[in-house]
Amino acid sequence: MKIFRWQGIIILLVLIALVSVFFIFFFDTLVKKTLEKTLSTALRRPVEIQSFKSNILSLKFTIQNIQVADKKNPYKNLVQIKKVAFDLSSEKLAFKKYHIENLSVEDIALNTQRKTPAFTKEEQEEREKKDSKKIPNIFEKLKFPSVEEILKKEKLKTVEVGKHYEKELSYSIQEWKTYYKDIQKEREHIEKLKQQIKTLENQVKHIKSLDDIKKIKENVKSLKAQIDDRLKKIKNLKQKLKEDTQKIQNAYKDINQAYKYDLNYLKNKYSLDLEGGINLAGLLFGDTIKNYLKKGISIYKTISPYLKRGEEKQKELQEKRYRLEGRYVKYVEYNPSPDFVIKEGKLSLFMFDSKITGRLKNFSDNQKIYKKPFEIFLNSKETKLFKDFRFYSKFDRTTKQEKDNFNLEIDNLKTKEIVLKNFIKFTENSVNLRADVSVLEEKILNGEVKFIFEKTKPIILRTDSSAEIFKQLFEDINRFFVLVKLGGTLESPSFKIKSDLDDMLSARFKNLVNQKIAKFNTELQAKLDQNRQKYEKQIQQYKKEFEKYSKLISQYESEYKQLLEEIKRKFDTKELQKKIKKSILKKFKF
């Protein structure tokens, strides 16, 4: 019996020793790895913890150097916390409820530099494919390309029409060069006809009988037929020439219309429409504000589910009890409490090169039972970079209408520079920030954020052709505000930006850009006019060719008609009859 007892005691001591060794050497490491994995899954980004230390007897825990990686930049941390320390309530732990006391969160810092990347290059590329969206540079539309660049890439109607008529009229000219060889032969025909007329005139002088008249009339008829054939051919050439001359007129008309079309089209395409003013504040601050809004929503979505986890768990238990009625037993709690509670904790946030202290109150996973909203307070008195910092947030799930509020006020915030779109930076800033935002039913977003730049100095970072315009545009502007109206839902947030910056810039913008547009349009018109003149010059050469042919055809036509008139006059039947009468009378004269 004694031996048995001593063996039992030895075994118990060995077990205690083994458990002690486990807690001393392995427990903290195991919890650290579990926490890293759990937080990484919950936050959907890599989370690293430098160390986790626990004191199981006193239920005191300390976590050192928590790093939450930025998805888009592996060498940056979205959030870094130097130290988290807290105690667990032993009284509630016996009921599997985790009530934290004496919480202390030290030196929360945003956008800090990492020594080693959070994920590999391949993982980074994969994340960028999923998360990133290419945002076009909105200022590219303010950059007027050179006219030479436009003419190289644009399909110009002037060139298209010009080449069409150049080809068509060139073919016509080749045809007329063949016709011209035939036209020149008309001189030979005319000379032959003239010779035949002279022969007939000589025959007329020696008329002796009616048979002579008959022969002359037959020859005259033959001459007229020959001339009619020549005139018919000339008429066909004139018709052809008329059609080709009409092409010349059409070419002038179509090329001028194409020129006007190109001019108007390119002016409209490459010039700015200034009606309704401008919205430079929205263009400048829009993407930056959108990114901050996304980050804020992401943080809110991470925190919000934990505020109702106990309530959801309770519903699951009730449903389970109903399904397995008679088998599941749960003791009724006379003073029910949430499974997870942080009554109060200290916070310290490192922001704007300053340490901002604060506290949180009444964090629980079931506010319906706890009956207290979760609140966060942060504040700081004057530092080198700001005069005053105040932040308050309230997550209220105690009533049917769930509502969360966020309020931030920063006075005289001095920032070295604010770079926007790698286009402009604001330096020597003194900014007042006011934000009042609410989320209703964990879904509907509402509120406004106002940035008041009491002092600033804008510097243009661009070096392209539009840089000089914007240097003049922002010259001497050192005060303005930007008001952001938030709306929509967390899944589809919207915001509208209003700023007196737009009012200040509008007149300058219109004046400066109109000057640039006027210069651009003048250069464009000159270049397009060169195209038009090039084709008009070619058409003018074709026109001169056609005029040469027209003049020659008209000349021969006129000569043929003169020959007809001459034949009619000289070989008139009555005149021939008179001549024969005179000849007969002369014979019988005695």
Image (cartoon, rainbow, N blue to C red):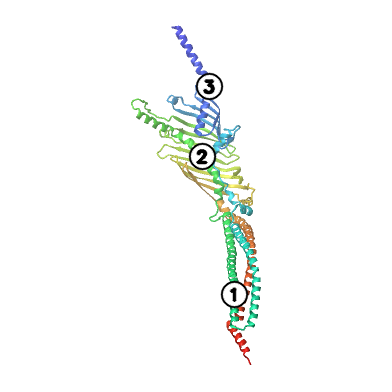
Q: CA distance from mark 2 to mark 1?
A: 107 Å
Q: Is residue 231 visible?
A: yes
Q: Is residue 542 visible?
A: no
What residue sits right under mark 1 in the picture? 222
Query: Is 70 situated above or below 455?
Result: above
Q: Position of residue 27 (x, y in %)?
A: 52, 22
| Element carrying mark 1 | helix
Dot placed on the residue nearer the N-terminal end, 3 or 1: 3
Crowding near pointer 1: few (<14 within 10 Å), some, many (20+)? Answer: few
| Element carrying mark 3 | helix
Q: Position of residue 57 (x, y in %)?
A: 49, 21
- Residue type for callout 2: Gly
Dot placed on the residue nearer the N-terminal end, 2 or 3: 3
Q: Residue 418 lies in what quarter of the image?
A: top right
**180 or 142, nearer to the observer:** 180
Crowding near pointer 3: few (<14 within 10 Å), some, many (20+)? Answer: few
- Quadrant including the C terminus: bottom right
Q: Residue furthest left?
A: 326
- Residue type for callout 1: Ser
| Element carrying mark 2 | helix
- Quadrant including the N terminus: top left
What residue sits right under mark 2 in the picture? 296
Q: Position of residue 355 (x, y in %)?
A: 57, 36
Q: Which numbered marker is on residue 26?
A: 3
Q: CA distance from mark 2 to mark 3?
A: 37 Å
**467 or 129, nearer to the observer:** 129
